[in-house]
Image (tube, helix red, strand yellow):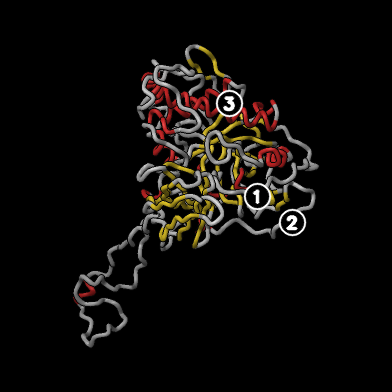
Amino acid sequence: MTVTLVPVPAPGPPAAPTRRRRVAVVVALVTALLVGGATVAAWALVGPPGAVGHDVSYPQCGQSLPTTGSFGVVGVNGGKVSTANPCLASQYGWASGRANGASLYANTGNPGAISTFYWPASGSRDPALCTDRTSAADAGCAYDYGYHGGQDSLRIARNTLGSGATARTWWLDVEVANSWNGSASANAASLQGALDALVAGGVGTVGLYSTSYQWTQITGGYSTANAAAHRSAWASAFTPKRPLEQAPLWIAGLSTVDAASKNCGTSFTGGTTVLAQYTDGSFDGDLVCGGGTPPTTTPPATTTGAASSTTTAPVTTTAPTTTTAPTTTTAPTTTTGPPTTAPTTSSVRPTTTTPTTSSVRPTTTTPTTTSARATTTTPTTTTAAPPATVPGVSTGVVAATDPTRGIALRWTAPVQTGGTPVSRYVILRGTAPGKEVTLGILTCRTPTCAWRDTSVARGARAYYQVVAVNDANAVGPRSPEVSAVAR
């Protein structure tokens, strides 16, 4: 799921359904959950175990979409809460043409009182009690923001797709690239509000998309182990409609379907992981967990707007195992390579000992001695762990007045030796120095990248920073701050 806020081409034509027999397979992830004595309906997910599909959103507007895969997950928003994916209708049509149909996902966040979309007043109950709108730790205010954000995503989906949108599985996209300015507990409350809004609107299944690292960064590690303590702290402001920690999980991207399948046995909340994301050519692929050995992947055949004529990519086997990402979802900064044992070279002793014991004559003229034969076992040595793969700082960041409109931002990819490639950049913008918040994400794999911001008022100055994100979802440091005046 690449959530970005970049200029996109005009939406393509509505997708035509494929001539496949629709298969209604429902995997029930089932437990009766009790909240305040009321039984909550069980979660359910459309798609058989082992099935693969793809997720798309507005960054894929105008692109040819895959004709392989049995389901599609489509982004409702345009990169952040309260924005709309301009290609929602056509992409949803494409996903609905898959054998197992379509699901939806929505952006989340907790920007605080600087929000231009919605933020409650102190003392209001809308629907939770917001005690102090200026406090980053006020869970009630954050819940209200999440609730209204969830309602707005439902409004967008219903207006575009009709009332049937609530019959689909929905996912909450929880990534550090979105705006998170609250405490860990308040951020979790915002997600609880978004989930409750979807449930109140008639959505039966709501899941969470994230990684262990990002979830911990945002919520402080909200899980089954500490959920009761959070609910106790929230009790004066609101009561959850459905436990956040019991939501099914969709774990964000790894490089291959084989690597992603290992994520099926992990969890960042204690809930059940039902989808695992991976890279499938130029698209995000998704594997339904529980299917045993994953299928061999091929680059997806594509169709423009799901037209009937397709161009099939050559069949290849899975990506080489040397590109497999770590099988855990913790931050790459804590990932260390396994120690490797250096091969034993006959009876050559380490350099810290006296005479060489190898039968190969040393470079000096000193003859080998018999005393060196006393020990023939070379101590095992290990190589150093590979360097961390966190991206470096984006370099050469420049902001300038665009000659046509707005502000043009340009930069160069971080200098990086080895590790996971950088593929995305978080764009941060503020109206004053040091006040930058997330504006959106640009997908860019080239050495130089550019962004044009046309949303700044003419004559106004805006401040920017750029943050690199790699394919393992590791987030680099902020770049130096730059600014420019909009045309």
How much space separates mark 2 and mark 3, taking CA atoms? 37 Å
Residue that label 3 marks: 43
How much space separates mark 3 and mark 1, taking CA atoms? 36 Å
Given contact means CB atoms under 8 Å apart, are the residues at marks 2 and 3 in contact? no
Farthest residue in the top direction?
37
Q: In terms of image quadrants, where is residue 330? A: top left
| Residue found at x 48% / y 57% | 410
Q: In terms of image quadrants, where is residue 381? A: bottom left
How much space separates mark 2 and mark 1, taking CA atoms? 21 Å
| Amino acid on which the number 1 mark rests in the picture | Pro
Q: Position of residue 401 (x, y in %)?
A: 48, 54
How crowded is the residue under tag 2: few (<14 C-alpha within 10 Å), some, or many (20+)?
A: few
Q: Secondary structure at mark 1?
A: loop
Q: Secondary structure at mark 3?
A: strand
Sooner in the amino-acid sequence: mark 2 or mark 1: 1
Q: Position of residue 190 (x, y in %)?
A: 46, 28
For the residues carrying marks 3 and 1, which lies nearer the camera in this image?
1
Residue that label 1 marks: 9
Sooner in the amino-acid sequence: mark 3 or mark 1: 1
In the image shown, does 55 or 321 lie closer to the viewer? 55
| Amino acid on which the number 3 mark rests in the picture | Trp
| Amino acid on which the number 2 mark rests in the picture | Thr
Q: Is residue 407 above or below residue 194?
A: below
Q: Is residue 266 above or below residue 128?
A: below
